Image (cartoon, grey):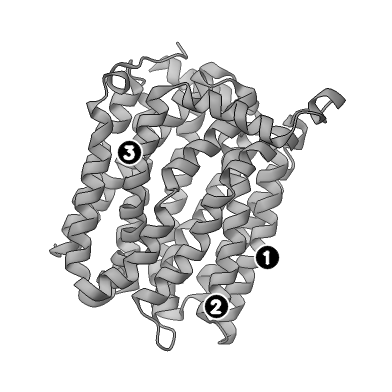
Amino acid sequence: MNDINDQVRELWRNVDFRKMFTSRVVSNFGNGMTPIALAFGVLDLPGGNAGSLSIVTAAHMVPLVLFMVIGGVAADRFGRALLVGGTDLLGSIFVSISAIAFLMGFASVPLLAFNGFVFGVLNSLWYPAFTGLMPQIVETRLLQSANALVGMGANLALTLGAATAGILVAAFGSGWAILIDALSFFIAGCLVFSLRHLDRDAPTDEEKEVGIITQLKDGWVEFSSRRWIVIIVVSFAFFHPAFEGFIGVMAPVRAKEVLHGARDMGFMMAGWGFGGLLGTIAALRIHVKRPLLLAVGVMPTISLWIFSMAVPMPIWFLVGTAVIAGIAIDVMYANWLTTLQTYVPEEAMSRVGAYDAFGSLIFAPMGLFVAGPFTKWLGTQTALIVAGTVALVAASVPLLSREVRTLTRADQ
C-alpha cells in the first residue's frame, strides 16, 4: 500500500503528468456527454430512426479503423504530443459545427455523418499517439499507476458528463451538451500541445530515408511476433462489432422504446463511467502476477448489461450491470495497456498500438452499419440477444490460450 501511495505522490510531482491527467479529465467530461446527446439528437430529427443513427455512428468509425495504422507511423515518426494536442484542437472545431447545427435547427444526417467522418480521421491519428505518450512522461515502473490514475480521473469525469448529459438533453436538447464537448476538446488540446518538448527530436537524414512501408513492416513484426497480442486482438475484432452496435445504436433505441429515453440512458452511461472509476482504482491497487488472465477474465461479464437491456430489467438493475461493464472495461484496459507498454519497445509502441486498435476495431463499422437495419428487421430485443451472445463468446475465447493465461508481468 505504501508503495502505491509513494508512486502516486511521485507522479503528482511530475508537471507533465499533471497536464496529461487534467487533459483527460476535461476531455472525458465532454466525451461522457456527446454519445447521449448525439444519439437522441439524431433519433429526434425528422424521420430519425435506428438506421439514421447507424449511418452517423459508422461514419465516425470507418475512417478511425482505415487510417489507424498510418496514425501509428505518424506518431512514432513525428511526435505524439504534437498529434494528440493538434487533433484535439482541430476536433473541437468540427464538434462545434455539430453543436451549432443542433442549436440553430439545421442539423441533418449528412452533415453529422460528414463531421463524424472527419473526426474519425483525427481520432485515427490521436489514438496511436496517445497510446505511446505515457512512456515518454513517466518511468516504466510507474506506468501501471500512471495509467490507472489517468483512468480514474477520466472515468469520474465520464460519469459526471453522462449524468449531466441525460438531464441536459432531456431538458434543453442536444446542442448545448455537444458544445460543452467541443470546449473540452479545445482545453485538452491546449494542455497536451504544451507537452511537445517530450516528443523525439526531428528525424535524422538516415531516419528520413526509412520509408513508411518499412516502418509499417517493422511495426507488424513487433506486433505479430507476440502470439498473445494476436490472439486477443483477433478475438476482440468480433467483440467490438457487437458492443459498438449495442452502445451506439441498440441501447439508445431500446431506451427510447421502453425506458425514459435520454434520462435513463444517461443514468446507465453514468453507471458505466462509475464502474470504470472503480476498475481503475482496482488497477491502481492490485498488481497481479498474470495481468492478461485478469484483463481477459473479466470481459465476459459485459454481456450481462446487453442481455439485461433485452428483457428489459428495471433501471436500477441496468445501471448495476453498466457499473459491472465499466469495471471490466477499465480493468482490462489498464492491464492490457501496461502489458503492451512493458513488452513492446518504446520506439515502436505507437505502431503496435495502431495495429492493436486496427485489428480490434476492424469489424466495428460493420457492427454499427448493420445494427440499425438489424434492429428494425428483427426488433430491438432479438438484436440485443444476438449482440450479447456474440460479445460473450468473443470475450471468452482468449481464455482458451495458455499463453494468455500464464503471461507474467515484465515491469517488476
Up-down relation of residue 362 to residue 215 (above or below): below
Q: Earlier in the sequence, mark 3 or mark 2?
A: 2
Q: Residue at x 61, y 46 (%)?
A: 126
Q: CA–CA distance between discs 1 and 3?
A: 35 Å
> Would you say 349 lies left or right of 210 here?
left
Between 7 and 342, the residue placed more toward the observer is 342
| Location of residue 153 in the rendering, given as x and y in whole percent from the top left corner | 48, 42
Q: Under tag 1, what secondary structure?
A: helix
Residue 93 disc label = 1
Between 291 and 65, the residue placed more toward the observer is 65
Q: Earlier in the sequence, mark 1 or mark 3?
A: 1
Which residue bears the numbered disc 3? 235
Q: Earlier in the sequence, mark 2 or mark 1?
A: 1
Q: Residue at x 24, y 35 (%)?
A: 397
Residue 110 disc label = 2
> Would you say 129 lies left or right of 388 here?
right
Between 341 and 284, the residue placed more toward the observer is 341
Q: Quadrant of residue 222?
A: top right
Q: Quadrant of residue 297?
A: top left
Up-down relation of residue 95 to residue 291 (above or below): below
Q: Are marks 3 and 2 in contact (CB under 8 Å)?
A: no
Camera-near label (2 vs 1) is: 2
Q: Residue at x 53, y 47 (%)?
A: 25
Callout 3 amino acid: Ser
| Location of residue 107 in the rendering, given as x and y in whole percent from the top left corner | 55, 82
Q: Could you tell me which quadrant the N terminus lies in? A: top left
Crowding near pointer 2: few (<14 within 10 Å), some, many (20+)? Answer: few
Up-down relation of residue 36 to residue 8 (above or below): below
Q: Residue at x 43, y 89 (%)?
A: 46
| Location of residue 210 in the rendering, given as x and y in whole percent from the top left corner | 76, 28
Callout 1 amino acid: Ile
